[in-house]
C-alpha cells in the first residue's frame, strides 16, 4: 500500500473519478438545507437526495466530491483509535447512469492500481447482499468482483443489517457491497468474516446500489432511476493505508497535537488517560472549528445544532483541564485546523474571526457554569446523609452544569462520601434513551422531504427572506433553516427582537407576493451569472459550477437546491406564529401557511 498524505488522497480520488467522466462538485454545508430529518450532514448522499430521487443535477449525472460530515451518536466513544465526530467522506455518484458493474470495476482499479492506493488484491475482502424477501441475493456484484480478481473465498454474503444502506427510517436505499483490508492476524473462528468484531477486517469503502425507496410502513418500491452512492472515509482510509495506530496519528491532527503538547507540557502517547484526553480535545475542537466556520455557521446554544456544538466545546474544556492546558487556548488549537484545511475549505479562513470569538465566549460561559455547579454541589452535599452521594444527583450536576463525574467523585471524596456510579450510569442511560427517542422523531419525515406541503413552505421561505431584507435591513441573510410539512423555521442575522409592526409588515409583503400569483421560474447558470443578476444565497459552489436560481417576479431571486411550488398563488396565507432569539445576534421565525 502507498503512503499518502490527506492532500494526496483527496486529489488522487477526485482526479481518478474525473478521468471516468465525473464532475467534481464542492462539499455542501454541514447544516442540511430542506432536510428536517437530521441536525447535520451525516453522509455524502444527504445533499444529493433530490437528485437521487430523479431531479436533474446542474453538473450532470456523474459526480464526485469530498463531503464534510458530522455524526454525534458516538460522542462518548471518542478517545479510542477510530471514532470521530467530524469526518470527510470521499464519494462518487451515478444519477441514473452507470450501475454496479462500472462502480465495482472502478473501485477495484482505485484500490489496487499502483498509481492510486496500491493494495494487493490478496489483502482485499468484499461483502455483498445475501438477499431476503425484499430484494434478491446479489450474485451479479459477486461475479463482477470475481472477474476483477478477488478470490472467491474473499467474497462474503451478508444479511440486510450488514449489506443494506439507508440513512434513516425512510428514503432512498438499496443493497451495498463493502470493501475491507485483511489485517495480519489469525481468524477469530472457523466462520470469521467481515461481520466479526475481531478486527481482522477493516472496512475501507462502501458502494450502495440504490434501487428502492423505503416507506414509513416498511414497504419498498422501486425508484424511478437506479443510482450508485459510494463512501470512503478519508480519516479511516489514511489510517489504514499508512499503518498508523489511530486516525489521530495521521497528518490531519499533527499541527493541533503539537500545539496541545506545547501548551500543556504533556506528550501525546505517554499516558493512556492523557492520550484519551488529547484525542477528545483534538476531535471536538476540529468539529467545533468546522461548525463555527461553516457557510451556515452554527453558534453555541441550548437547542439543536447549537446544543451539540456547546457540548463539544465544553467537553474539550473539561479534558483540557485534565491535562493541564491553560484556559483561553481553544482558539490556538482551532487556528491549527484553519491553517490545515484552508486550501480545501476556504470558508474556515473567511470565518476565522467568528470561530475564535465564539470559542472564547463559550469557554468563559462554561467557567461560570462550573462555578455555579460548585455552589450547587456544596448546597446539596450538606443535605445528603450517610456516605453515598446519589447517582441521580451526580448526573444532574453533569447535565445541568457540565460537571464531569470524576469532578463530583473527587469533591465527594473530600467530604467522606462515595458517588453511586451505578445510579449515575442508570440516569445517564435513561437520558440517552430519551434523547434517542427524540432523535427517532427527527426521521419521521424521511430524508429531504419533497412533498407538496414542504415545497410550498420552502417557497414561502424565499419570499419571507426577501421581505425581511426589505423591512429590516438588506444585510439580513439566512443562518439556518428547518422545514417540515407543518411549518417553516428560519434563522437570520439580526441584533434585536422584531417589533409587532415589523412582523405585520413582513406578513403583508409575503401575502402580497403570494396574491400576485407569479410563476416560480428556475434557471441554471454559473455562480458568476447568478451574482451578476443579483441573486442572493450562500455562494458555496466554486466559480464556473452550475447552480439553480429561482425567481419570483421582481420580489425574489435566490440560489437554492430545494423543492418549490410552480406558482406563488399555490401557497395559501402566510402567518408568522413566533419570533424569538436563536443565539447571540441571530433571530428565529416560525411560520405556517393556511389554505
Image (cartoon, helix red, strand yellow):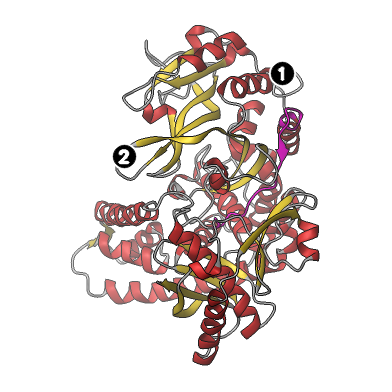
Percent position (x, y) of residue 348? 71, 58
Q: Residue at x 56, y 71 (%)?
A: 517
Q: Main secondary structure of the magenta part?
A: loop
Magenta stretch containing residue 436, yes or no? no
Question: Of residues 397 and 84, which is closer to you in this image?
Answer: 84
Q: Helix, strand or loop at disc 1? A: loop
Vertical order, 293 against 130 (above or below) = below
Residue 113: image tag:
1
Q: Left or right: where does residue 194 sit relative to residue 275?
A: left
Residue at the left extreme, as displayed? 386
Q: Quadrant of the C terminus?
A: bottom left
Secondary structure beneath label 2 = loop
| Disc on res. 404 | none
* Marking on residue 218: 2
Whole-percent x, y for residue 1 in the image: 68, 20
Residue 533 placed where, x, y %? 78, 66
Identify the residue at image location x=45%, y=18%: 138
Mark before the other along the chain sequence, 2 or 1:
1
Q: Can residue 358 be seen in this view?
A: yes
Above-or-below relation of 428 to 128: below
In the image, residue 24 lies in the stretch drawn in magenta: yes
Query: Which of the two discs, 2 and 1, sits closer to the camera?
Result: 2
- Report the magenta residues as a range: 16-33
Amino acid at each position: 500500500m502507498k503512503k499518502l498524505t490527506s492532500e494526496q488522497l483527496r486529489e488522487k480520488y477526485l482526479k481518478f473519478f474525473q478521468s471516468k467522466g465525473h464532475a467534481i462538485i464542492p462539499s455542501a454545508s454541514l447544516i442540511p438545507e430542506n432536510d428536517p430529518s437530521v441536525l447535520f450532514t451525516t453522509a455524502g448522499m444527504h445533499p444529493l437526495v433530490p437528485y437521487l430521487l430523479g431531479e436533474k443535477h446542474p453538473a450532470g449525472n456523474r459526480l464526485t466530491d469530498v463531503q464534510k460530515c458530522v455524526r454525534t451518536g458516538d460522542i462518548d466513544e471518542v478517545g479510542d483509535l477510530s471514532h470521530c465526530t467530524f469526518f470527510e467522506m470521499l464519494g462518487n455518484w451515478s444519477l441514473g447512469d452507470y450501475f454496479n458493474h462500472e462502480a465495482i470495476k472502478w473501485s477495484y482499479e482505485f484500490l489496487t492500481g499502483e498509481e492510486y492506493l496500491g493494495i494487493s488484491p490478496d489483502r482485499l475482502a468484499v461483502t455483498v447482499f445475501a438477499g431476503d424477501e425484499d430484494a434478491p441475493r446479489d450474485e451479479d456484484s459477486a461475479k463482477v468482483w470475481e472477474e476483477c480478481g478477488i478470490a472467491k473465498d474473499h467474497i462474503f454474503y451478508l444479511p440486510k443489517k450488514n449489506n443494506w444502506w439507508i440513512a434513516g427510517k425512510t428514503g432512498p436505499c438499496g443493497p451495498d457491497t463493502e470493501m475491507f483490508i485483511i489485517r495480519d492476524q489469525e481468524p477469530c473462528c472457523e466462520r470469521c468474516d467481515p461481520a466479526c468484531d475481531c478486527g481482522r477486517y477493516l472496512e475501507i469503502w462502501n458502494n450502495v446500489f440504490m434501487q428502492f425507496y423505503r416507506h414509513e410502513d416498511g414497504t419498498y418500491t422501486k425508484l424511478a432511476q437506479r443510482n450508485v452512492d459510494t463512501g470512503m472515509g478519508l480519516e479511516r482510509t489514511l489510517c489504514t493505508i499508512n499503518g498508523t495506530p489511530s486516525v489521530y496519528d495521521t497528518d490531519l491532527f499533527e499541527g493541533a497535537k503539537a500545539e496541545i503538547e506545547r501548551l500543556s507540557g504533556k506528550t501525546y502517547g505517554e499516558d493512556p488517560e492523557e492520550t484519551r484526553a488529547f484525542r477528545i480535545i483534538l476531535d471536538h475542537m476540529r468539529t467545533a472549528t468546522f461548525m463555527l466556520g461553516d457557510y451556515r455557521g452554527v453558534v453555541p446554544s441550548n437547542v439543536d445544532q447549537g446544543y451539540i456544538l456547546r457540548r463539544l466545546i465544553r467537553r474539550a474544556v473539561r479534558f483540557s483541564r485534565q491535562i493541564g492546558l491553560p484556559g483561553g487556548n481553544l482558539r490556538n488549537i482551532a487556528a491549527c485546523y484553519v491553517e490545515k484545511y484552508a486550501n480545501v475549505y476556504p470558508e474556515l479562513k473567511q470565518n476565522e474571526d467568528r470561530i475564535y470569538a465564539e470559542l472564547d465566549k463559550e469557554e468563559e460561559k462554561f467557567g461560570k457554569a462550573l462555578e455555579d455547579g460548585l455552589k450547587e454541589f456544596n448546597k446539596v452535599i450538606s443535605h445528603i446523609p450517610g456516605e453515598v452521594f446519589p447517582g441521580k444527583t451526580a448526573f444532574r450536576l453533569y447535565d445541568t452544569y457540565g460537571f464531569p463525574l470524576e469532578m463530583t467523585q473527587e469533591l465527594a471524596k473530600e467530604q467522606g462520601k462515595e458517588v453511586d456510579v451505578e445510579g449515575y450510569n442508570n440516569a445517564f442511560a435513561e437520558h440517552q434513551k430519551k434523547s434517542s427517542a427524540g432523535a427517532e422523531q427527527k426521521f419521521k419525515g424521511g430524508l429531504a422531504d419533497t412533498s407538496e406541503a414542504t415545497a410550498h413552505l420552502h417557497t414561502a421561505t424565499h419570499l419571507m427572506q426577501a421581505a425581511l431584507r426589505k423591512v429590516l435591513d438588506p444585510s439580513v441573510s439566512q443562518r439556518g433553516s428547518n422545514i417540515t410539512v407543518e411549518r417553516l423555521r428560519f434563522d437570520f442575522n439580526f441584533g434585536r427582537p422584531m417589533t409587532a409592526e415589523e412582523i405585520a409588515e413582513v406578513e403583508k409583503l409575503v401575502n402580497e407576493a403570494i396574491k400576485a400569483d407569479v410563476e416560480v421560474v428556475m434557471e441554471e447558470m454559473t455562480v458568476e451569472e447568478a451574482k451578476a443578476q443579483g441573486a442572493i444565497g450562500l455562494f458555496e459552489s466554486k466559480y464556473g459550477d452550475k447552480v439553480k436560481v429561482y425567481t419570483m417576479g421582481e420580489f425574489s431571486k435566490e440560489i437554492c437546491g430545494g423543492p418549490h411550488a410552480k406558482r406563488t398563488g399555490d401557497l395559501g396565507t402566510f402567518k408568522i406564529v413566533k419570533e424569538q432569539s436563536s443565539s447571540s445576534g441571530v433571530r428565529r421565525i416560525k411560520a405556517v401557511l393556511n389554505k
